[in-house]
């Protein structure tokens, strides 16, 4: 009888040990599962932060789920591969629709290096100021005496205008410019350091209407840039003189240009070449103009960007009645520093300052514009 009780006691003791061990094992498994869940949560938060940072700088990455291993022989479909037939190699950047509202993309669109999607309209009020200073030797008469002097011409130019850009089908864009100009010219004649004669004149009037059409010719790849072709017609619709002051313009001009852009986010390199032909008017034909520019646009943040640009142009001699006027050719060089900031989701503030590098260029210029993008497509 005692032996049976002993066996029962041993059996109960062993059963109790196994039960305690199993419960301890279950507790450890639950603890491990909780730890794995916390780890997965931390990894998810880190991935979301990384993807947010990559979207800020415009990097397109393939969507992935860390909890599921990718299949080795998966076949890309329209749902899983948003860019069929393209390789996401270094130097190739795909801009998503939401990223197109960054200050960098808006600045590139304003500069003509990117085109608007079909049906999207940009309305851009503009304002600019330029200062021109030039001196030339002159002869000054005082009574019966003749003196060698110097005449200094200082011109202040203000231009206000409206630019319209409308995205068209087939990767093209319509561009229209409507300017209004005001100019003040001060003439100061000096002999030695003494001013002998001073005069000031000012005039204002509408400028020449510009109409252009741009088309994307080449899409960016691993080594090739985006390439945009553009044809612009500058009419002679503006006022050329007012109150004895020359406002410029007055000629029909046709310009063709190529603009290339290569992106390495957060930097975009932009370069362009252009040729402009001016048509004869009243036996006067200004010379043709060849121009080139190169610059970089830098995204400082999604809301701000910086622009550095160097431009140069050469204009051939003007012809009068078929004869060239010696010394009428011009060489123009300028360095421009600008910045842009998003004031609202669809409103960009652009400021830039230019410094003339040659005698024929404006000595100083400052411009401001406010491109506003419509929130609905027109078609």
Image (cartoon, rainbow, N blue to C red):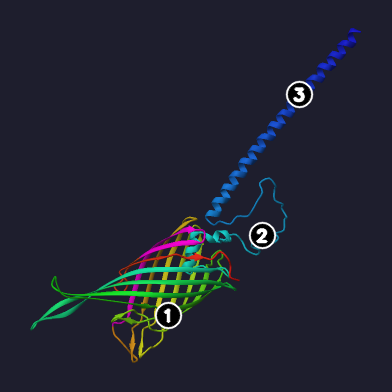
Q: Residue furthest bottom?
A: 321
Q: Residue furthest left?
A: 144
Callout 3 secondary element: helix
Query: Is residue 48 or residue 92 the one in the foreground?
Result: 48
Label placed on residue 21:
3
Q: Magenta span covers which residues? A: 327-353
- The vertical placement of 38 against 374, above or below, is above
**Residue 345 image offset from top left, x and y in percent:** 52, 58
Label placed on residue 81:
2
Q: Which residue is mark 1?
A: 276
Q: Disc 2 to disc 1, how far (Cα)?
A: 43 Å
Q: Would residue 329 be counted in the magenta stretch? A: yes
Do labels 2 and 1 touch, CB within 8 Å?
Answer: no
**Residue 180 image offset from top left, x and y in percent:** 39, 75
Callout 2 secondary element: loop
Q: Quadrant of residue 14?
A: top right
């Amino acid at each position: 009888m005692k032996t049976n009780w002993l066996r029962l006691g041993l059996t109960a003791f062993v059963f109790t040990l196994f039960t305690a061990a199993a419960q301890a094992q279950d507790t450890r498994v639950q603890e491990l599962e909780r730890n794995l869940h916390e780890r997965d949560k931390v990894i998810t938060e880190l991935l979301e932060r990384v993807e947010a940072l990559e979207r800020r700088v415009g990097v397109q990455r393939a969507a992935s789920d860390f909890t599921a291993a990718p299949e080795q022989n998966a076949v890309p479909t329209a749902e899983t591969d948003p860019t069929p037939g393209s390789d996401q190699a270094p130097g190739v950047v795909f801009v998503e629709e939401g990223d197109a509202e960054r200050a960098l993309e808006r600045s590139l669109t304003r500069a003509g290096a990117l085109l608007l999607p079909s049906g999207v309209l940009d309305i851009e009020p503009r304002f600019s100021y330029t200062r021109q200073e030039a001196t030339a030797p002159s002869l000054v008469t005082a009574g019966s005496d003749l003196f060698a002097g110097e005449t200094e011409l200082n011109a202040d130019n203000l231009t206000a205008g409206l630019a319209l850009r409308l995205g068209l089908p087939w990767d093209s864009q319509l561009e229209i410019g409507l300017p209004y100009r005001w100019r003040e010219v001060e003439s100061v004649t000096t002999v030695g350091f003494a001013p002998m004669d001073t005069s000031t004149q000012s005039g204002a009037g509408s400028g020449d209407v510009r109409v252009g059409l741009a088309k994307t010719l080449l899409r960016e790849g691993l080594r090739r840039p985006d390439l945009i072709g553009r044809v612009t017609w500058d009419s002679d619709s503006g006022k050329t003189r007012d109150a004895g002051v020359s406002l410029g313009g007055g000629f029909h001009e046709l310009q063709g240009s190529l603009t290339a852009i290569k992106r390495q986010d957060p930097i975009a390199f932009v370069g362009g070449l252009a040729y402009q032909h001016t048509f004869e008017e009243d036996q006067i034909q200004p010379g043709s103009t060849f121009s080139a520019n190169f610059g970089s646009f830098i995204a400082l943040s999604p809301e701000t960007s910086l622009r550095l640009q160097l431009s140069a142009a050469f204009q051939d001699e003007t012809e009068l009645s078929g004869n060239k006027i010696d010394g009428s050719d011009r060489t123009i060089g300028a360095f421009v520093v600008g910045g842009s900031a998003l004031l609202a989701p669809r409103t960009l503030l652009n400021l830039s300052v230019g410094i003339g590098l040659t005698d024929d260029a404006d000595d100083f210029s400052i411009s401001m514009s406010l491109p506003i993008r419509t929130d609905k497509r027109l078609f």
